[in-house]
Amino acid sequence: MTALTSPPREPTSPRRAAVRRGDRVFRGLTLAAGVFTLIVLAAIAIFLIVKALPALRADTKGFLTTREWLPDASPSVFGIAALAFGTLLSSALALVIAVPIAIGVALYTTDYAPRRIATVLGYVTDMLAAVPSVIYGLWGLYFLIPHLVPVQSFLARTFGWIPLFADPDNRTSVASRSIFAAAVVLAVMILPIISAISREVLAQVPTTSREAALALGATRWEMIRTAVLPPSRPGLISAVMLGLGRALGETIAVALVLAASFDVNWRVLTPGGNSIAANIATKFGESGNTGREALIASGLVLFAITLIVNLAARAVIYRSGAMERSAAV
Amino acid sequence: MKVKRTGGVAGLIVVGTVALAACGSDNNAGTTSSGTSGGTSASPAAQVACASGALTGAGSSFQAPIQQQWVKDYSAKCAGTQINYQSVGSGAGVQQFTSGTVDFAGSDVALKPDEQTKADARCAAGPAVHIPITAGGVALEYNLAGVKDLQLSPATVAGIFAGTIKTWDAPGIKADNPNAKLPATPVTAFHRSDGSGTTQVVSEFLDSQAKGAWTLGSGKEINWPGGQGAKGSEGVTAGVKQTDGGIAYSEVSFAKANSLSVAKVRNASGQYAELNAANVSKALESFTVTGSATDVKGTVNYGVSSGYPISTVTYVIGCGKGGKNTPLLKSYLTYAVTGGQAVADSLGFAPLPTAIADKNKAAITAIG
């Protein structure tokens, strides 16, 4: 699932032509690891499809367009429209918040900070990644939401003319469990992943390139813009995509923070919104048979969304990689 | 090829060991906690006819606090027993019971016909039976500056949760509270975002007692037109605590733990009843058993003329015949419905009325 760029391959020059036993064993082990990953992925896909089919057959309204979730009622009504919308909107918003900060942190540690500060900063950001997501959820629920009231009402008052920030019923005057609040929590959660990988990617840029740019009279910012960022782009995109993957699939933190409504709500500051993973977490315990299958069907959709996002990221990396190569020639 | 297989086996062994280790530590933790702390809080009431062995139940999170207390007290009286109740939710509990992984289920609602069929099939030799194990009222907890003794009629509650009553000085609330000084604060109603037996109780109450004002039906999940959802009783309670003008339904223990006020609710005789154990027990005197002498399932009457109207029972579902660990199940359930009822009040539940308790005893005796 990860989309890291593979390091350039060394030209193969075996010291001895004869393949040793140890080589064969190791080759077998790595092959097994690779095959195992594929088998797991296929097994998950098959499980989801098989379990989801009965619910999809029992559904009386369009699964993709319905904005309700009452699978155990009769007639059974459920659909993923609102859930998929909320998942994508909250994740996209989280990226908007997290990516500039994460890449900023990474650039500061590789290109600006003194060595000692850079090391400490690296440790601290990595530690953010070690915090369990339920802790982020509790932090969001008990601390962030009440403290976000002034921010949300400020955004609503100042940028209310943008439909995204509109709040016609003045619902941001009290604690609002909004998509925005969820996106802030998600942003904090994906920040360490994006910044840690970005840091590694940026550090891969050869010092000689940096020195060459500086020697040509570039300022530090120009050096970063011309010599550091372009070759790092595929890696940075990979980092962002990994972060997006985590945001799309984040379950308990979102479940604790969001107000869980089933409407397609563009107003990110007002209470409401839901996500596929959060809905599975909240509904699973009390679901009947159809309910469980319906939740698995929604899981199938999330699986598909994640695959599509990863494939799209691959395509972007491939194309930008190809561009770099052609530019170099 | 050979190598690959060895790798796979090694992997399996690792996974297996980890899983076993996890189970082991879980069990150990369970025994230690019940062993050390059980002695102090064991209720002095009633002789217990001990049985031995292990017993596992799973289900309703509503009844989990009292189940855990019973497990602790029972283990303190009967050494060498190992009872475990997993708070996984009624639906999941019923499913685990049906698939045979637990000996009994805790459920806030009686089995639906199709679930009953499956549960009967699991028990093989006899039908699955319901035992109403404890009673409880659903609290309407609120946070409204300056208002302490809020009174609500079913129609007003319906308006609040359906989103038709938008401010605290709305005519409906004023009519219920003629003497209170109500502010114009907006109403923020919190409901459970997860499927919940509590939601089912409240919606059934509104469906039967607020006809006309409540059009959203009843069930563990409701298609809410407004308000804010939150996960679990702790989630809705946090919402109310953070919001002036907030109101939610939850177990009374959450309101107490967060020092939130609880509204009085009007019953069928027009009296505004406070939520306490006595009023819940009184309301459940009109519980009608629809099952049989061996199966104490029934319907809750929300139109009570005395007592707190949003009161309900929660069930344990076990095998009438052909279950596993039957002696311990019988012994444990007998303890729960007799001596165990003494702890109900302190945990936010209410002791079962005598009529139900007597039927329970007969039904438990018939299990075999």
Image: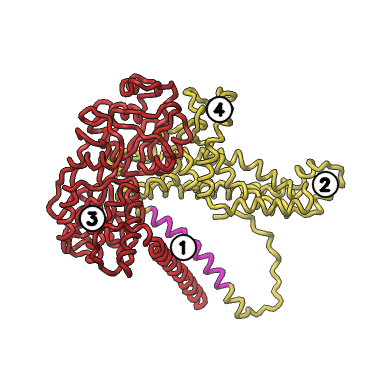
Q: How is the image coloured?
A: by chain
Q: Residues within 10 Å of mark 2 (few under 14, many from 20)?
A: many
**Where is residue A229 drawn, in percent x and y?**
72, 46
Q: Nearer the viewer, mark 3 or mark 4?
A: 3
Residue at the extreme front: B44
Which residue is tagged 2? A213
A47 in magenta:
yes
Q: Nearer the viewer, mark 1 or mark 3?
A: 3
Q: Residues within 10 Å of mark 1 (few under 14, many from 20)?
A: few
**Where is residue A303 drawn, in percent x and y?**
46, 50
Report the magenta residues as a range.
Answer: A27-48
**Where is residue B44 drawn, in percent x and y?**
29, 58
Chain B as rendered: colour: red
Left or right for B172, reference A257 = left
Earlier in the chain: of badge 4 and badge 1, it is: 1
Residue A54 vs B148, above or below: the answer is below
The kind of residue on which mark 3 rests is: Thr
Which residue is tagged 1? A39
Earlier in the chain: of badge 1 and badge 2, it is: 1
Residue A81 vs A132, above or below: the answer is above
Work out how far the residue at label 3 is from the one at label 2, CA to CA, in angstroms: 84 Å
Per the image, label 3 sits on a secondary structure element best described as loop
B360 in magenta:
no
Which residue is tagged 4? A153
